[in-house]
Amino acid sequence: MKMLVLVPKVTGRVIYVFDLMLKQLLGIDFDLTTDAESFKAYDGPKLHYGSQRIGDEPFVKAVDLLFERHIHEQSFRTVDFEGTKAPYAVFGNGNLMPFDVFAASFFLVSRYEEYLSQVRDQYGRFRAEATWMYENGMLLKPLVNIWSVALGNRLQSVYPELVIKQMKFKFVPTYDIDAAWAYKHKGLYRTLGGFFKDLAAGDRENLRERHQVLRGKRKDPFDSFDFQFDLQKEFKLRPIYFILCGDYDTNDKNISIRKTAFQSLIKTLGDYADVGIHPSFSSYLDIDKLWIEIERLSEVLHRPITKSRQHFLRMNLPRSYQKLIELDISDDYTMGFASQAGFRAGIADTFRFYDLENDMVTNLLVHPFALMDGTMRDYLKLDVDASSALAKQLVDEVKAVGGTFIYLTHNETLGGEKRWVGWPEMYRKLIEYVYQ
């Protein structure tokens, strides 16, 4: 049964957010109309989205955001709503919700505020601490999912015959391969440089470890791939690996993809999982470098590369996504913060990238991740127990709305040595918690 939605004007933004909120998250098929008379005559479930209520049908009072085409500073009031806070509070009798749920969702999912603020960290990344969600203590909640559930409940209370889709929780483990090995396959000059660096620093432990690994007396501390494969087999996981294929640089220190051992590893990963590109730090906004890196990975795997996650999560909206689209990348997994856990776009589900600069929806699918190992260990300074508790909290939030929980970790972390002691065990317990 289709729902008819009355709107004052049909725009790209209106179509986009109603498709996300009603069709994708609630499973409600709908049509949009600007004809008030046909709306009144319609004998089925209806929703009115506009500035002033004209009948008894469910009504969401609209602000201007979805009817604009330009980008400008936003001014809105924040309202408390069922354990969350929401922007674009509206006032008056008969409102289905005390805020414009469609404008609020569009504001978060489009990352509207990232086009306005120039607050950046040392790597040129938009800072989590500058978001409306962080400032209001909402970054750990998948707000758009929560609001869609509330919207569906309210619509169903008016139209009991309306069927609401029950979303199913999913878990997607992802791995960034920034450096496949700590010591092995580095080549003569890098290996000698490592030895001299350890000598200069007086780091005897590193010297001993490096020597033992290179002589085959000890496993490389970054080589946690067998552990990963065992988990994938035991829990029937289908993870995604993102491979750094850039040239050696200050922030790009993976093994050269020309190395036979690295190519062999990549092919093995491709047998166990999906593989995507991990665009290098130095390819940031450089489409020619990015194309070269994608081609390198494609040649090793003998198949097109369609998935991507930026190294260092270094992303600029909309240019980073525009360049990925130019190079036929269909799915991006960068949407998340390094310094804070939670939901950068306020949602725990895949959504299409809306290019605000060109005011149009694109075919690029954005897959937001909720948590990264380095966020907990390096930014939030959490120990293993506190990190486990935070991870479980986020899993519970996503399970409650039937969303998708994407976790980002590294092969170095799962090696479990030095700063990562105890983390492989934490990761296994997290997976067990996900599936219990």
Image (spheres, rainbow, N blue to C red):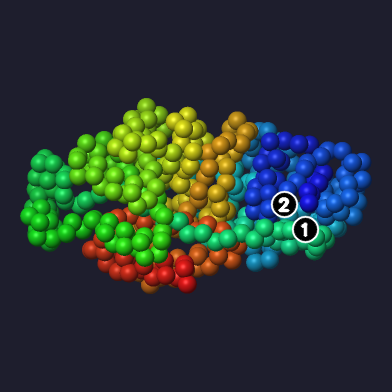
Q: Residue at x 25, y 38 (%)?
A: 257
Q: Residue 187 or 65: which is nearer the viewer?
A: 187
Dot 2 falls on a residue whose secondary structure is loop
Q: Which residue is mark 2?
A: 28
Tell me: 12 left or right of 195: right
Q: Which residue is mark 1?
A: 162
Instruction: Examine the rendered structure and indicate whether residue 405 appears above or below residue 8.
Output: below
Precedes in sequence: disc 2 or disc 1:
2
Residue 359's spot in the image, x, y percent? 63, 33
Tell me: 69 left or right of 257: right
Q: Is residue 32 visible from the viewing direction of this image?
A: yes
Q: Is residue 200 visible from the viewing direction of this image?
A: no
User: Is disc 2 in contact with disc 1, using a CB cutoff of under 8 Å?
Assistant: yes
Q: Residue at x 78, y 51 (%)?
A: 1
Q: Residue at x 64, y 40 (%)?
A: 73
Q: Residue at x 27, y 67 (%)?
A: 421
**Mark identifier at residue 66:** none
Instruction: Examine the rendered structure and indicate whether residue 338 appears above or below residue 428.
Output: above
Q: Quadrant of residue 255?
A: top left
Residue 20's spot in the image, x, y percent? 65, 47
Mark 1 belongs to which amino acid?
A: Leu
Measured Cα–Cα span from mark 2 to mark 1: 8 Å
Query: Callout 2 environment at 10 Å: few (<14), some (14 to 19), or many (20+)?
Result: some
Dot 1 falls on a residue whose secondary structure is loop
Tell me: 110 left or right of 69: left
Residue 5's spot in the image, x, y percent? 80, 46
Query: Callout 1 environment at 10 Å: few (<14), some (14 to 19), or many (20+)?
Result: some
Mark 2 belongs to which amino acid?
A: Ile
Instruction: Examine the rendered structure and indicate whether residue 114 appears above or below residue 133.
Output: above
